[in-house]
Amino acid sequence: MGAYLFPIKTAIITFPIAGFILLIPFLIWQYRKHGYINYLRMLVLYSLLLFSMAAYYLIILPFPATFDTCSMQRPGTQHYQITPFTSIMDILRETKVNFANPMSYIGILKERAFLQVAFNFLLLLPLGVYLRYYFRRNLLQTVIITFFVSLFFEVTQLTGFYGLYNCPYRLFDVDDLFLNTLGGFAGYMIAPIFTYFLPDVHAMDEKVDFENKPVRMTRRFLALWMDWFVIGIVTSLIFNVKVSIAFIFNPAEKLDELLLGFVWIFVYFIVVPYFTNGKTIGKWILHFRVKGQGERITFIELCKRYGLLYYGIGGINYILIASRVLNEQLEIIFLLLFFIFNGLILLHFALHIFKRDKRLFYEKMSKTYNVITFKKNK
């Protein structure tokens, strides 16, 4: 069993790393496709990721100690087995079962040949459950998808992990294709047993009221990160200077470069949303926009909103940092004021994470707020 436990343990250890790397692409995809984050869907898909990693690790780990795997094998070693049902014959040949004595059947559970067959049957059984419950595939589609996943596994083994090793270190077995596919078929058939008490994720989407659903902080911060990423790329290409929030509020920067940052804020967060009715690139990707008192956002509303946010908060921070640099005798005082001011801002943001009304002070003062623009497919 140790040969099976090691890959599973490795999958559990590396899963948080993979989950973190895929988190932002996952969030973007969810907002684009579904318009919001469904935590049940998130749980299902992350469990699918863990299963996929475990299944993949089970067919590639442990790696050989050397890339020269040919030197570890006898000349003429066969790397494939294409005779159907050889595994069944192995069970009959290796097991000491007396079919006239039912008590001897228990012994078969400990035999290597039987465990290998059971492993290959169970390997992709969960995939059949996922395909039926979440992806809504029919039986034929499930069988075909499972077969090609199994074929991918077998090709991975036959190529020596895509040529990394000069000889395959595992056998390409046609019985594995059959047993893996049979497992996917069985998973499809028994899926209702496992999913009976789980709600229909897709039916939950139909009940979401996007017109009244608040835009949560996760969505807003993700859009903000995307917007500043775009600004940084564009300014680097055009002016050979990467504009960022830290760059703008740094008193050590040259005046012309500092002004460039403030101009870009004005163009990107005020002028562009005025013509797009409240959308930046980040907001457009994540399906939401800024709305004012009327159906169309006004230039004045955008000036108030982003003026308070960037020129207000940013300007005060710039003054405090610059004053600390210019007045060495009062450096501690200005540094203390800097932390107090930003601490209050962070506290204000944190408190609104848990409120139904997500509007921050600059939104209330400008009488603007975020609304979801996602439209359900009819």
Image (spheres, rainbow, N blue to C red):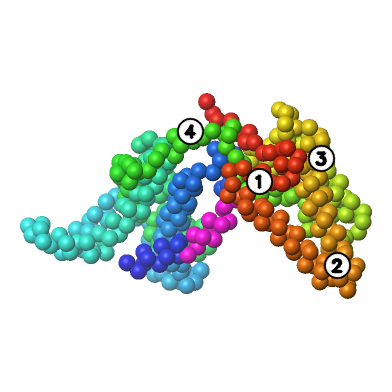
Residue 238 visible in this rendered orientation of the protein: no
Name the residue that disc number 1 marks: 220
Residue 70 lies, with reference to residue 198, above or below; the image says below
Dot 2 lies on which element? Answer: helix
> Dots 4 and 2: beta carbons under 8 Å?
no
Marks 3/2 in contact by CB < 8 Å: the verdict is: no
Using the image as rendered, state which of residue 330 and residue 157 is in the foreground: 330
Q: Nearer the viewer, residue 362 or 116?
A: 362
| Residue 55 point in image, percent of width and height | 41, 56
Residue 75 located left or right of residue 363: left
211 drawn magenta: no
Amino acid at the residue labelled 3? Cys
Say which mark, if any, is on residue 303: 3
**What's the residue at 89%, 51% (across, down)?**
259
User: Which three-letter amino acid code belongs to the residue tagged 4?
Assistant: Lys
- Picture residue at 74% right of the left edge, 45% below the top: 362
Magenta region, residue range: 13-24
- Helix, strand or loop under label 4: loop
User: Visible in this render: residue 299?
Assistant: yes
Q: Which mark is residue 324?
A: 2
The type of residue carrying mark 1 is: Arg
Q: Amino acid at mark 2?
A: Arg
Residue 334: x and y, percent?
Answer: 82, 66
Q: Earlier in the sequence, mark 3 or mark 2?
A: 3
Q: Neighbour class for label 1 at 10 Å: few (<14), some, many (≥20)?
A: some
Q: Between disc 2 and disc 1, whose residue precedes?
A: 1
Query: Circle 4 sits on which residue?
Result: 207
